């Protein structure tokens, strides 16, 4: 057997960090504030990433330890996205929209030792602390709530003060590409939230694929408005894709109401955006303030034709992006499509990107053809698709190395998916 002569260089997040801070040092992250925004460069972000890593090490965070984030879409959250996995620990972005009992469950299940919390979200998180079994440190980003008393065994820290005085560089360890980097939980309606562990390899590959033409098409000439929460899978891999390509980021933090989001967009002036259909529907009354946008990805199961038409009239192309189970399908029409064909492609769930494979399975277990007519349950596999759940058994969700999505539909010969209904296991 012939062996490869390629160098064995692991796909590690630290390489994305180094590339972004050195080659794209002047790219920026805008974070919305009340009535404006604050801006930091990738170079400045890299300094804070190093200081956060030193601070976490000082708190005793080591290899494999989980660090939770209970935060909005802001620059400090991006710093955690890099510092934690590059340190060799595991990032756990917590869904701030969950009810309190589910937040407590995922924190305990993940065994978070440290949680970074936005000051504005502290009133939600602080009442849960006495019941949390593993949390030792809470780092508060921004103004907190005066008069808080930490429960026994828990220490509060202020983010900026904790980072202050630490070195601006860090000697990042070689983690290896198969080392756990992030732990994300999702609810599938079948009980407690399920955890999925992402490694450095899967995150790096996903970042490369997301940046490709035909997907998001990111480059150093772009500014991307990220209007999807950073705690989702994690953040669709967009912070990592940005550091890979040099695309600047616009993050709305907690200012996600339509009027505030529109004002932030008008101020930051991104040309690309990612958000759910609810986001774009909410912004319909404010389209005049979105003049910098040329294209916006619409996450969700489908995008209404009327919504596409409204944005088309303002020169903004909505690109449906079906984003579930870790997979991403993009409904971009092929260049050979004309007239009504273009609308037809945009109304599908799209075509899976990169090395993600999809198949349709009939109730009897037979694999169905991609003929645009045969309807079956959708199963997917790929380098960033879950093969099991973290500390949870669900054998019915996986079959022969494929993830059973629970969705039913058909796939055309050119790979475009159309869902017809959701299946129950």
Image (cartoon, rainbow, N blue to C red):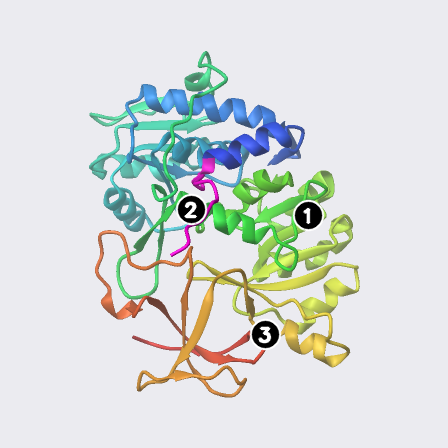
Quick check: is 106 in the magenta stretch?
Answer: no
Quarter holding the C terminus is bottom left
What is the spatial separation of the Cα atoms under label 2 and label 3, in whole angstroms? 30 Å
Look at the magenta stretch and give its main secondary structure.
Answer: loop
- Label 1 crowd (10 A; few <14 / some 14-19 / many >=20): many
Q: Does 223 sit left or right of 66 as displayed?
A: right
Q: Which mark is residue 378?
A: none
Q: Secondary structure at mark 1?
A: helix
Query: Where, by quadrant of the figure, is residue 298 drawn?
Result: bottom right
> Viewer-nearest of labels 2 and 1?
2
Magenta segment: 1-13
User: Which of the labelled discs sits on residue 262, or is there none?
Assistant: 1
Task: Pick whichever, 394 or 232, lies toward us.
Answer: 394
Instruction: Verify whether residue 9 appears in magenta.
Output: yes
Residue 93: x, y in percent?
40, 43
Where is residue 94? Give x, y as percent. 38, 44
Q: Is residue 116 above or below residue 275?
A: above
User: Residue 158's spot in the image, x, y percent?
Assistant: 41, 21
Q: Secondary structure at mark 3?
A: loop
Q: Nearer the viewer, residue 168 or 128?
A: 168
Question: Camera-side residue: 39 or 355?
Answer: 355
Spatial distance from mark 2 to mark 1, Cα to Cα?
A: 36 Å
Query: In the image as oriented, which residue stretches furthest toward the top?
Result: 165
The residues bearing labels 3 and 1 have C-alpha atoms spaced at a distance of 28 Å
Mark toward the start of the polypeptide (2 vs 1): 2
């Amino acid at each position: 057997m012939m062996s490869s002569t390629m160098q064995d260089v692991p796909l590690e997040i630290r390489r994305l960090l180094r590339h972004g801070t050195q080659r794209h040092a002047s790219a920026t992250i805008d974070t919305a504030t009340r009535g404006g925004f604050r801006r930091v460069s990738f170079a400045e972000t890299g300094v804070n990433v190093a200081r956060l890593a030193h601070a976490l090490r000082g708190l005793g965070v080591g290899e494999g330890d989980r660090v939770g984030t209970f935060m909005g879409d802001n620059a400090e959250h991006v710093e955690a996205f890099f510092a934690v996995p590059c340190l060799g620990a595991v990032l756990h972005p917590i869904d701030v929209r969950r009810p309190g009992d589910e937040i407590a469950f995922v924190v305990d299940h993940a065994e978070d030792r440290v949680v970074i919390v936005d000051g504005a979200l502290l009133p939600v998180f602080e009442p849960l602390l006495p019941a949390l079994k593993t949390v030792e440190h809470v780092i508060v980003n921004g103004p907190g709530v005066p008069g808080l008393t930490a429960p026994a065994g828990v220490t509060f820290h202020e983010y900026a003060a904790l980072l202050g005085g630490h070195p601006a560089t860090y000697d990042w360890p070689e983690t290896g590409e198969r080392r756990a980097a992030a732990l994300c939980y999702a609810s599938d309606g079948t009980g407690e939230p399920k955890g999925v562990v992402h490694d450095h390899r899967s995150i790096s590959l996903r970042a490369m694929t997301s940046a490709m033409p035909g997907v998001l098409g990111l480059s150093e000439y772009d500014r991307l408005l990220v209007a999807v929460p950073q705690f989702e899978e994690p953040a669709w891999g967009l912070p990592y894709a940005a550091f890979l390509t040099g695309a600047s980021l616009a993050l709305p933090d907690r200012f996600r109401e339509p009027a505030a989001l529109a004002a932030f967009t008008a101020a930051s002036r991104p040309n690309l955006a990612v958000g759910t259909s609810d986001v774009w529907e909410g912004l319909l009354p404010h389209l005049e303030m979105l003049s910098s946008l040329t294209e916006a990805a619409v996450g969700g199961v489908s995008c209404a034709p009327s919504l596409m038409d409204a944005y088309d009239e303002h020169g903004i192309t909505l690109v449906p992006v079906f984003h579930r189970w870790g997979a991403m399908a993009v409904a971009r029409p092929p260049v050979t499509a004309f007239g009504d064909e273009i609308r037809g492609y945009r109304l599908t769930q799209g075509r899976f990107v990169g090395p993600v494979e999809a198949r349709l399975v009939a109730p009897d277990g037979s694999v169905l053809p991609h003929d645009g007519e045969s309807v079956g349950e959708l199963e997917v596999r790929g380098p960033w698709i879950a093969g099991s759940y973290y500390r949870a058994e669900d054998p019915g969700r996986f079959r022969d190395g494929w993830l059973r999505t629970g969705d039913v539909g058909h796939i055309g010969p050119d790979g475009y998916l159309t869902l017809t209904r959701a299946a129950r296991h």
